[in-house]
Amino acid sequence: MEQARSHRLIINGDYFDANALAKKIGKRTHPVEARLAVLNLTPESQKLLEGGNLYQTQAEALCSLSERGQGARSAR
């Protein structure tokens, strides 16, 4: 979450898009976009990720679900 928030601050402050940021930090676009996507998770899912109760890859998979779907998955 911390890295995602940092990416968002850079993008918003410097008017980058995910592709430009990825080039600037020497990464591919997809990982940057995946980090940014977790900012759209429900607050409950974000807390699970921040607390270490959800892996980054799991959080990225949850991003494709609705809020309701995230709740059903994160309750396990």
Image (spheres, rainbow, N blue to C red):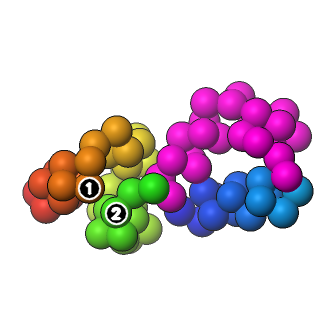
| Numbered label attached to residue 67 | 1
Image quarter of residue 7: bottom right
Q: Is residue 24 magenta?
A: yes
Q: In the structure shown, which secondary structural element does the residue marked by tag 2 occupy?
A: loop
Question: Can I make out residue 25 in this image?
Answer: no
Q: Residue at x 28, y 43 (%)?
A: 65
Image coordinates for residue 1, horizontal then vertical, percent: 53, 62
Q: Residue at x 65, y 41 (%)?
A: 32
Residues at badges 2 and 1 in contact (C-beta under 8 Å)? Answer: yes
Q: Residue at x 76, y 42 (%)?
A: 17
Image coordinates for residue 75, horizontal then vertical, percent: 13, 61
Q: Residues within 10 Å of mark 2 (few under 14, many from 20)?
A: some
The residues tagged by marks 2 and 1 sit, at their Cα atoms, a distance apart of 6 Å
Q: Nearer the viewer, residue 68 or 7?
A: 68
Three-letter amino acid code of the residue under disc 1: Glu
Report the magenta residues as a range. Answer: 15-39
Q: Which residue is mark 2?
A: 42
Q: Is residue 2 left or right of residue 53?
A: right
Image quarter of residue 14: bottom right
Q: Is residue 36 left or right of residue 54?
A: right
